[in-house]
Image: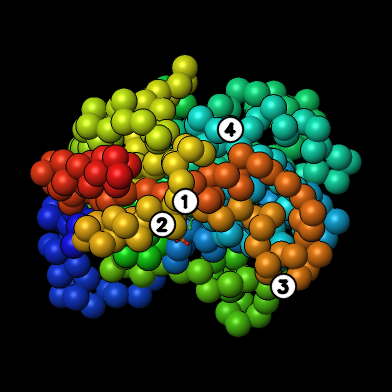
Amino acid sequence: MILVNEPLLDGNEKKYLVECIDTGWISSEGPFIKAFEEKMAAAVGRKYGIAVSNGSVAIDAAIVALGIGKGDEVIMPSFTIISCAAAVVRAGAKPVLVDSDPLTWNMDIDQVEAKITSKTKAIMVVHIYGLPVDMDPIFALAEKHGLKIIEDAAEIHGQTYKGRPAGSLGDISTFSFYPNKHITTGEGGMIMTDDEALANKCRSLRNLCFIPEKRFYHEELGFNFRMTNMQAALGLAQLERLDEFVVKKRRMGEQYTSLLQGVTGIQLPLEKTPYAENIYWVYGIVLNDDIPFDALEAMKRLGAEKIGTRPFFWPMHEQPVFHKMGLFVNEKYPVAERMARRGFYVPSGLALKSEQIDTVSAAVKKMLSK
Ligand SMILES: *Cc1c(COP(=O)(O)O)cnc(C)c1O
């Protein structure tokens, strides 16, 4: 079986983990946390990094830290992971959706302004599958309407937008270090900002809003979103290789494209846009409408050839859990709907070998030639 994702853990990961065991620092107290936060902040060009237990809760904390709550609205793409909308809903606010661009698969920035109301507090941009959102129009809208920008950078470590690091573009940004991301801590995430007050707020929220001078006395409700020293040890070792990993991902994406270019019936990821070159977090494929089967069937057929795949995101406006809350009922975002039904991705992990990319590409071609 060629797995859809296999991480690469052959740097200093083991050495740093053994250090945690040998020194006894296995909780969220321990030197690797601070080192990882500082190195990550330096890599992204941000002042503050707050390590948390995963990328989803990083968004929860960011929303709460910005003071977004009841009566507020946050504009975001329908085509994303549920973590984005869930954080807004849990805070008591309302996600307001836009459709996607059919070529970049990112939010359609031309649809954002029409969704801004007097209740809008923020725009949540989510960089999808390896290409950043075109940020300049978003910056202009945020400025014009006095909105915050929340940047979900979970899929885009090491990417840039017009030369600026992804993750440095929002008022607050969030990363995930799940094993399929460019760098992993097993489970883990980070909130990043240049705003000291926001950073302090996130640090407090992460640790149950304990007050240092008065332990077990609380003025606000927080969470236990702490990352362990062991996770940070992995993260530090991974971060040492981020540049190398991005080069490798680009090479993998380029190999897939060179093998699949010109195959009829499929749409491949864009190699570049005027503002960025793809880093192929995952290598996505969208079936054209004239292919007589959908993504689910394609994944089944590739599975029979021992090739792991994953479907594209299922849009937020088609989630039963939100319909039950009365959200997004009868809303339509045709591009996101089509991507969900026609899109899937092929093995894209950092441990994937060149011969395996050949095998996967041959299987995709065979499936389409029948
Ligand atoms: C992976 C991912 C997350 C969630 O990260 P977890 O660490 O799995 O909770 C959030 N947003 C996007 C866009 C992601 O791809």
Mark 1 vs ligand 1: CB under 8 Å? no
Q: Is residue 239 visible?
A: no
- Amino acid tagged 2: Glu
Q: Earlier in the sequence, mark 2 or mark 4?
A: 4
In the image shown, does 224 or 268 lie closer to the viewer?
268
User: Quick one: label 2 or label 3, which is nearer the N terminus?
Assistant: 3
Q: Are marks 2 and 3 in contact (CB under 8 Å)?
A: no
Q: What separation in Å lies between label 1 and label 3 (alpha carbons)?
A: 52 Å
Q: Against 84, is 279 above or below?
A: above
Binning the other alpha carbons within 10 Å of mark 4 as few (below 14), some (14 to 19) or many (20 upward) gives some
Write down the residue under mark 4.
101
Residue marked by disc 2: 297
Q: Identify residue for label 1.
A: 294
Asked if disc 2 and disc 1 are in contact, CB closer than 8 Å, the reply is: yes
Q: Residues within 10 Å of mark 2 (few under 14, many from 20)?
A: few
> SS class of the residue under badge 4?
loop
Please state the total of marks drawn on the protein image: 4
Label number found at residue 219: 3
How far apart in space, not on screen, are marks 3 and 4 (Cα)?
44 Å
Establish if 238 lies above or below 104: below
Tag 3–tag 4 contact (CB < 8 Å): no
Of pointers 1 and 3, the one earlier in the residue sequence: 3
Report x, y in % for residue 13. 18, 59
Mark 1 touches mark 3? (CB < 8 Å): no
Disc 2 is placed on an element classified as helix
Secondary element under disc 1, as helix, strand or loop, is loop
**Residue at the spot x=58%, y=59% of the render?**
82
How much space separates mark 2 and mark 4, taking CA atoms?
24 Å
The kind of residue on which mark 3 rests is: Glu
Name the residue: 22% across, 71% down. 20
> Can you tell which quarter of the image residue 282 is in?
top left
